[in-house]
Image (cartoon, helix red, strand yellow):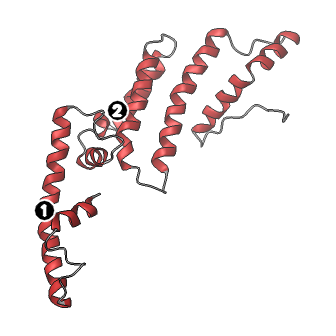
Amino acid sequence: MTPLCLIQAVQTRWNSELNKEKRLQLLKGPLTLSTTETHSPVVRTAQEWDTSKTFIEVLACFDYATCEASKDKYPSLSSIIPLLCMISGQLNLCKEKEATKEFAEKVEFHLLSRFPDLYKSSKIHVSAMVLDPRFKNILLSNAELLFAKSYIENLFEDQQDVVEVSVSNSQQESGDAGVWSFSSRPNEYVLIHLL
């Protein structure tokens, strides 16, 4: 069995605090036992250990959101609103506890100052979320869903003219109206490019 050491928080890395708290929770038993045997000052009270668990839950949401939004193997724009809503929901749970209420309110204030209305008024973010099958019918009110659909339809109509012109030019150059002809199906061609 590999011995575990405590992890130090690093000022320049926000997730080091999360890692430190996780390790402290993992080593809670041995730490508490060693302080009682050596008559050292108590590491933490029971309430402080419970508060630490709540901090871990909130910081774990930020860690998960950071990892998901930073991935480069697949598009992540559509997951931004759900990730922000997940963090907001976790903060609401923290506000119910007296020990973590102040912390949750401060974090929520900074979250909303950086991401007003959790990006739900952003055409790009809402449209990406609506087009993603995982998030298509969640987190949005009917008004927000109609807003996104009308934006996508308008974008689609604007692009249709561009595609028709470029398709007709390429057909004139090649003189071929075979398999690669999109003039009979310009809508399908645009939809592929929008997704």
Q: Nearer the viewer, residue 159 or 116?
A: 159
Q: Residue furthest right?
A: 38
Question: How many residues crowd mark 1 within 10 Å: few (<14), some (14–19), many (20+)?
Answer: few
- Asked whether, in this view, residue 4 is left or right of residue 116, the answer is right
- Asked whether, in this view, residue 177 is left or right of residue 130, the answer is left
Q: Residue at x 50, y 32 (%)?
A: 61
Question: Disc number at residue 33?
Answer: none
Q: Which residue is mark 2?
A: 112
Q: Nearer the viewer, residue 50 or 137?
A: 137
Which SS class for mark 2? helix
User: Which x, y percent locates residue 89?
Assistant: 40, 25
Question: How many residues crowd mark 2 within 10 Å: few (<14), some (14–19), many (20+)?
Answer: some
Q: Amino acid at mark 2?
A: Leu
Q: Residue at x 60, y 43 (%)?
A: 12
User: Which x, y percent locates residue 162?
Assistant: 15, 71
User: Which x, y percent locates residue 76?
Assistant: 41, 50
Choose mark 2 or mark 1, whichever is in front.
Answer: 1
Q: Earlier in the sequence, mark 2 or mark 1?
A: 2
Q: Residue at x 54, y 32 (%)?
A: 60
Between marks 2 and 1, how big is the CA–CA gap?
33 Å
| Residues at marks 2 and 1 touching, judged by CB atoms closer than 8 Å | no
- Asked whether, in this view, residue 125 is left or right of residue 167, the answer is right
Q: Residue at x 24, y 78 (%)?
A: 179
Circle count = 2
Which SS class for mark 1? helix
Q: Nearer the viewer, residue 71 or 163?
A: 163
Q: Quadrant of residue 13?
A: top right
Q: Which residue is mark 1?
A: 158
Q: Is 168 located above or below residue 11 in the figure?
A: below
Q: Quadrant of residue 1?
A: top right
Q: Amino acid at mark 1?
A: Asp
- Image quarter where the C terminus lies is bottom left
